Image (spheres, rainbow, N blue to C red):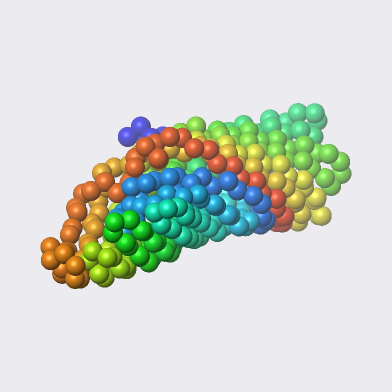
Amino acid sequence: MVRRALRAILLCSAFLLAQNAKAESVSLEIGGGAGWIDHTFVERLGKDALRKESLYSLPVALYGSSQIRRSTPGGYHLLLQSRSNDLAFNLFSRSNYWNTTQRVSSVDSTGLRMQTNRYSVSERTRGMEMGHQIHLLNDRLTLIPGYGLLSVFSRMQGDGTSIDQLNTSVSVTSFSLAPADIRTSADGLFIRLGMDYQISEGYQLVALVRYLPDGIGEWTQQSNSLALGYSSSVDYFYQLTVADIRGKSNRRMGSLDLKLVREVNSFFQVNVGAHWQYSSTRYSVEPTRGAIFTAGTGGFSSLTGSSYVYLGEPLSDAKIYSHRKSENRFNLYLSMTFTTGEQNL
């Protein structure tokens, strides 16, 4: 209730300020770029032993070395900015996209396992902020402290394939397909500090720091898998798994923007900049909802044509997600800014 009240107060105050402020300029910045990211959520999935067992045939739960490869993330951002003599009001949006591939392999005396998981990841950060402009050094330096509301949403869509061969008292060979859809979100109030410095005629240095101390949200993981195989005990078998894992998320996030602005004229600017973002997230896991269907033909009569269903069985290890993990991202970008110049709206 308190969080919702704070959001309502922020939205109302920002709307009133935006309506009553005597705007000297309104600008729109559009840009894009690419960089580097350290995405740790895939590593958590790789360490979740219960998830491995639930997504693939239960007799074949081999462990092996995991290799993760990430593509270069690309993305774009938008910034709508309104400034008066003392106030600044911004709406901003930043989106990033990248692909991640996880490969697991294991070979020992009991058998072998080869597994490949491919994820397409997208993340959107949106928010609104306002600040008070403090002019120093004969207006060459402007400090803009303020606060705002931030919302982060990310989605991972993936598919996995695995081939398993187990040679013990019961020989098992299986092939599995496992699509997954994972979504996380967090939002909260943040503080910010901006700086504009006029280097020389036509050149400006812009810096901005944002910090989100406590972003609250939720996450869901929907996974379905189908395993087909052959066992020396039951001949051919299949296993279908449907899992719905969900819980709460808590995120801390900080970002730093550095941008060099070249003022072409009063209405157009060209920018080159760097964006660095640090986030730290932990997840809580609620009781899992899921089902596992298994059927075999031949072999033991108790398994012939039978189906086994496990409702409410834990399909995820909560400890894997409860620890706070950090992620880093760095982007270089180019952008253009269109501005109205100084005028009253």
**Which quadrant is the N terminus positioned in?**
top left
Residue 274 x, y percent position in the rendering: 70, 46
From the viewer's side, name the closer residue of 57 and 30: 57
Residue 296 x, y percent position in the rendering: 21, 67
Is residue 183 toward the left or the right of residue 290 in the image? Answer: right
Is residue 136 toward the left or the right of residue 149 in the image? Answer: right
From the viewer's side, name the closer residue of 76 and 219: 219
Q: Residue furthest right?
A: 201
Q: Which residue is at a point 72% across and 31% down the rendered structure image?
A: 135
Q: Which residue is at a point 80% across and 51% down the rendered structure image?
A: 263
Image-quadrant location for residue 290? bottom left
Is residue 260 toward the left or the right of residue 310 in the image? Answer: right
Q: Which residue is at a point 71% across and 42% down the rendered structure image?
A: 258
From the viewer's side, name the closer residue of 164 and 284: 164
Residue 193 x, y percent position in the rendering: 63, 33
Residue 58 x, y percent position in the rendering: 29, 55
> Is 304 located above or below residue 50 in the figure?
below
Q: Residue furthest left?
A: 302
> Is 33 located above or below residue 227 in the figure?
above
Residue 86 seen in this snapshot? no
> Is 61 located above or below residue 253 in the figure?
below
Is residue 115 toward the left or the right of residue 264 in the image? Answer: left
Q: Which residue is at a point 28% across and 59% down the rendered structure image?
A: 170
Q: How many marks?
A: 0
Residue 37 seen in this snapshot? yes
